[in-house]
Amino acid sequence: MPNSSHLSRWIAIISHYSRKGFYEETLRLFRQMQNEGLPPSRFIFPSVLRSASKIFDSRTGRSLHSSSIRSLLSSDPFICSALIEFYCKCGRIKNARQVFDVTPDKDLVVWNSIVSGYASHGLLEEGMSLFRKMQSCGPKPDLFTWNSLISGFAQSGNEQMALKLFDSMKITGIEADVFSWTSLISGSVRNFNYRKAFALFQQMVEVAQIRPSSATISSLLPASANVLNLRRGKEIHGYAIVNGFEADLFVSSSLVDMYSKCGVISDADKVFDHMLVKNTVSFNSMIFAHADHGRCEKAIKLFYKMKIYGSVPDHLTFTAILTACSHGGKVKLGKYLFRFMQEGHQIVPRLEHYACMVDLLGRAGNLFEAYDLINGMPMEPDFFVWGALLGACELHGDVELSQIAAMHLSELEPDNTGSLCLLASLMVSAGRLGDAEKIKKAIKKKKLRRYLGCSWTQQ
């Protein structure tokens, strides 16, 4: 029979590694423990499942699920909640629901795991259905339950429902915390309801007297990311300095982004330079800032500087640096970085990377190379990819390719007549007045159909 103190040491080590974020090492240690013939423990499952979900190792998770059934631990609410969370984080909601349905003694943690899982995946009707069951025959929902749904509705854009739940929660006697308020603020910003976001922040600080978190500040700063709200942004920056948030990486990165979008690139530089610690997120924000302001050389220099700080470029880094190359006319470097992203960092190109490359090639006049790149894409090109080609065709006066791009854009967004207007303008410039007139008639027909459709639905 295994020594209980020996097993306890394994549990402590594995739990420690999982908490510290060493997920692959956690799974390696767990396999080593199994090889020693030690039995599974209810206290070790959550740590291992959490690590498996973080690196999307669904095989290990399913193996643990089978192991829990064999060892008669599958009915333990502690294990069940961990399994539900694992399946939800891996996107296997059906499996999570199956575990929930067969759990005999569903405690509050089990209910919260499934409600939170539905909410985080935008399955809000299912989440609300279970929430109502909780209210009628399950354990009483707690702050975590309410917050899961408030956050879910806020992130989905249903600001009204999020506010309704927020008010209902307070009626039941549960006081909102910083997460509740941050969810509402974030939801208002997502809906471009900036005035409401600022009002909620003021209410949170002055009326509810709840200290914001770095997440609150970061979620509010995008509301200031235009010239009209620069004063607000500076006020939030001042608040962040006074309350010790400026050192937070996400707050600093959001400040860089805010100042850049407000057109004050010098202030973005200052914030970035004063950051004691820099990571991939902060580098991405500054590279995007340089790219958007046409500072191609600075963006490139910063990209290579990342290595000195030990920051690893991600897919957003390459979107930023390819944008900089496009704006700076660095075709050769852009092509190299596009290959380097795939071969050196094993990053599979996304639609935004292809849009950057089409823009890069198109601006340089390599229109057919850009068109060949589109035809070789492993996924369907989107509006931005074809839009980049059409913009390049307008720049270089290529009527034939512009017709192809405009046709695809019209299919992707039938109600958007902008691409056809651009094509008509190109036809006029090329002296093809008859073709331009045909396109203008097609635009009028589209607008008339849209008007009649709206009139019919409004009756």
Image: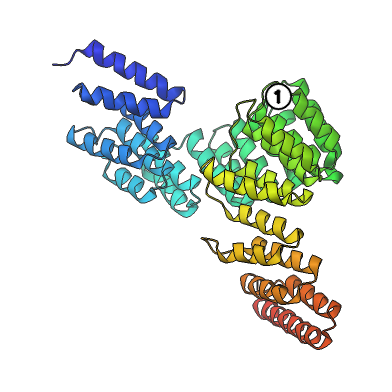
Quadrant where the N terminus sits is top left
- Where residue 355 sits: x, y (%)? 65, 57
- Where residue 169 sits: x, y (%)? 55, 39
Q: Residue furthest bottom?
A: 434
Q: How many marks?
A: 1
- Where residue 317 sits: x, y (%)? 64, 41
Residue 433 found in image quarter: bottom right
Left or right for 174, reference 86: right
Quadrant where the C terminus sits is bottom right
- Where residue 103 sits: x, y (%)? 28, 40
Q: In the rendered view, tell whether residue 393 sits above or below residue 332.
A: below
Left or right for 421, reference 210: right
Left or right for 231, reference 87: right
Front in this rendered view, residue 317 or 105: 317
Front in this rendered view, residue 247 or 185: 247
Q: Residue furthest left?
A: 1
Does residue 217 appear in this view?
Answer: no
Residue 187 found in image quarter: top right
Q: Secondary structure at mark 1?
A: loop
Which residue type carries mark 1? Phe
Task: Judge the density around disc 1: few (<14), some (14-19), many (≥20) Cα neighbours within 10 Å.
Answer: many
Q: To which residue does mark 1 refer?
A: 245
Q: How are the colours assigned in the image?
A: rainbow
Q: Residue at x 85, y 77 (%)?
A: 429
Residue 83 found in image quarter: top left
Q: Residue at x 82, y 84 (%)?
A: 432
Q: In the rendered view, tell whether residue 374 sits above or below residue 250.
A: below
Front in this rendered view, residue 219 or 282: 282
Q: Residue at x 18, y 32 (%)?
A: 71
